[in-house]
Image (cartoon, rainbow, N blue to C red):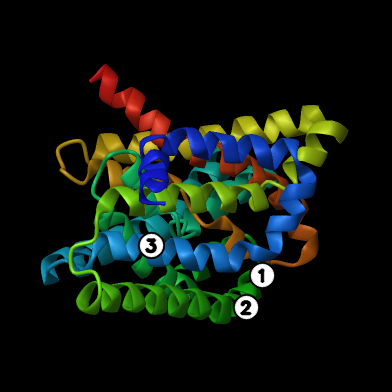
Amino acid sequence: MTAGLAFAARHGRVLLILGLVAGIGLPGLAQTLRPWLPALIVALLYVSALRIGPAALGAVGVRGRTLALTLAYQVALPLALAAAFAGSGLGLTPLAAAVLLVTAAPPITGAPTLAILAGHDPAPAMRLLIAGTALLPLTALPVFALTGAGEAAQSLVLPSLRLTAVILAATAAAWATRRWLLPAPATAPLDGASAILMACVVVGLMSAVGPALAEAPERLAIWLAAAFAVNLGLQLGAALLFRTSLDRVPLAISAGNRNIALFLVALPPERTDALLLFIGCYQIPMYLTPLLWAAVKRLS
């Protein structure tokens, strides 16, 4: 078992790609795994927190920096983009609305795992995940007002609180495990378990992409190109901004990989049709993120 998990850790980036391929090419499997997504995400959070340990909290100064970054990522950035869209005449096209919602969302629950698979410290990503999710009902208000869905922000309160509670509960359970059962767990098996869980999660999240590939490939290509541009643009922009920081990569991963799916519970159905396909497309650059940073490391 331990040897198998260590093998998965060594080939974690490949496992993520296999998950993408399975999600697109095996729609039946994607539908089967979809109801298990909440349990898989809880398990992923637990394993990530067990791997990181209480050091993820950081000192008081680090927490203040996390708060400032959360406000920059989830408030200042989408507001700046909204002003740019208005000035360029794009207004609120479906693509512009999707970009605003991406930048208003907190990091994905798998952001710490992506940082691990990229070979970097996952603690900064974990801090941004907790802070961004907890503050989402407040940080989303200005963006929802700009998109004409200000009343929908109230619908985010309960989902955000639930996800925050899940994150805190999984983290507390993991740290209790470290305190009482595994004070110094081996990292390789945990990294392998995280890679396997993320590969399973993406299969369930890709259920909308396979049908689109068969029925409307041109439309899929447009949204896929947009997803790559937004995700990689945010990551590379953050990497340049924090190029002198030791936390450059986890901060960049958190900047580009956002939990836009949270907004599905708040927005009316007529606003989510295009968003569903965009979310599916967005998983592809997300799960290629460790390969991106491996390539950057080789080139640097």
**Circle 1 residue:** 265
Q: Is residue 196 visible?
A: yes
- Whether the residues at callouts 3 and 1 have beta carbons within 8 Å, the answer is no
- Sequence-wise, the earlier of marks 2 and 3 is 3
Q: Tell me the tag on residue 155.
A: 2
- Sequence-wise, the earlier of marks 2 and 1 is 2
> Marks 2/1: CA distance?
7 Å
| Residue in the image at 21% along x and 77% along y | 179
Q: Tell me the tag on residue 47.
A: 3
Q: Position of residue 149 (x, y in %)?
A: 65, 67
> Marks 2/3: CA distance?
29 Å
| Residue in the image at 49% along x and 43% along y | 84
Q: Position of residue 29 (x, y in %)?
A: 74, 49
Q: Amino acid at mark 2?
A: Ser
- Whether the residues at callouts 2 and 1 have beta carbons within 8 Å, the answer is yes
Secondary structure under tag 2 reads: helix
